[in-house]
Amino acid sequence: MAGVGSAYAIRVRGSSTVGTMQGIRGAWRRTAQGAGLIGDDGGIRPTIFAEMSALAAQTNAINLGQGFPDEDGPREVLEAARAAISNGVNQYPPGRGAPDLLHAIAEHQERFYGIALDPHRDVIVTAGATEALAAVLLALIDGPDDEIVVFEPFYDAYAAVVALSGARLVTVPLRWPDFQPDLDALRDAVTDRTRIILVNDPHNPTGAVFSGAARDEVVRLAERHDAVIVTDEVYEHLVFGDAHVPIATLPGAWGRTLTISSAGKTFSTTGWKIGWVSGPAALIDAVLAVKQFLTYVNGAPFQPAIAAGLRLPDSFFTGIADTLRAKRDILGAGLRRAGFDVSSPSGSYFTVADAAPLGVTDAAAFCRELPARVGVVAIPLTAFVVPAHRGEYATLVRFAACKRVEVLEDAASRLALVDS
Ligand SMILES: Cc1ncc(COP(=O)(O)O)c(C=O)c1O
């Protein structure tokens, strides 16, 4: 979708007429609408991430917008991928995933969380967490009366895929500055119409790690209303306090929970798109029924490489959290010095800052100006909420801390000029 402009023109089949998107029927429209990307002319606008990354390139600004690291991940993982290519691991892997990776995922879940998985029945490998999410929602949604409860702000793919699935999105607010779920609002949101409660913990874009009370309430409500819990845990190893607690480990949760994760964030391999989903075999089979007709399989030589990554010693996993915590602190201190109010993320790549003390009333406009003003790119939180709720997040901005220390220090010194 990135880079597709509203003036996007197509050649209509069987004629030489050039039309616009407006005349094209199909699910693209509700998908784009779900993501808030339909422009005034009825065409699709680029995402804010594409817009901001283009601005970063144009202005030579430091890109703290999109969440990708600017350093390679562990050498062992990169070398394992090179070796796999050299050794001929270049054809379709099995539909559920390469056995070595399926075993490594099961070992990882046992080692870190005490979850016992049958690697051949309870796990499938996907094209990143994004495909896992799409396959899960498309597999489990049965029509327009199904509702999906999400915590807002949310990762932008959620609303798009919910809209594609045809279900109704029901939001529960996470509010500045700690972004913990409002439990009363959660109780109001979950009903017998709820098919899925979609959790993202640690959370993008806020960096929140859900409290034990919030996790317990999700499980209690899912049991009471017979909903499936889908939990996106791609930042599971990037937590700055207590160890990550997967919802699937809570009493009563396992039988109704699908856990999604990905190698991208843990091993700084966001471009490899190796993800996975794990849970009870019957739910996994339902997801596989759809997934096998989306990508079928992907990333043959990357799968054994990620298996090697998942088997790295504990010191690797504590090391990446420690490193990112230090980066969060550098970024946070820089933002505070520049005059922002700054939240305290407990996990993920991201820090949210309030630009209101700088006199900002519209963070989207502020973010569009920021590259030219000081040479830094960031994303307004309004990009992660439904249009009706943008006002509640109007002055908040997301900055990514997953960059080299010298880049963050440079960004901090540039941001110090923002008020001048
Ligand atoms: C919360 C969340 N879920 C899923 C993804 C996508 O993961 P992947 O690149 O593995 O598809 C991201 C990437 O930014 C994310 O932040």
Image: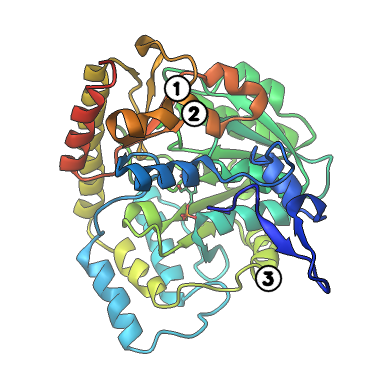
Residue, disc 1? 396
The amino acid on which the numbered mark 1 sits, given as a three-letter code, is Leu
On the image, the x and y values in percent for residue 247 come to: 51, 40
The amino acid on which the numbered mark 3 sits, given as a three-letter code, is Phe
In what quadrant of the picture does the C terminus appear?
top left
Judge by depth and name the residue closer to the eye, 160 or 376: 376
Residue in the picture at 41% in, 65% down: 272
Judge by depth and name the residue closer to the eye, 279 or 291: 291
Q: Is mark 3 in CB contact (under 8 Å) with mark 1?
A: no
Q: Is mark 1 in CB contact (under 8 Å) with mark 2?
A: yes
Number of other residues with Cα within 10 Å of mark 1, as a class: few under 14, some 14 to 19, many 20 or more: many
On the image, the x and y values in percent for residue 213 come to: 50, 24
Residue 312 occupies which quadrant of the picture? Answer: bottom left
Judge by depth and name the residue closer to the eye, 210 or 392: 392
Look at the numbered disc 1 and give the secondary structure of its residue.
Answer: strand
Label for residue 333? none
Residue, disc 2? 381
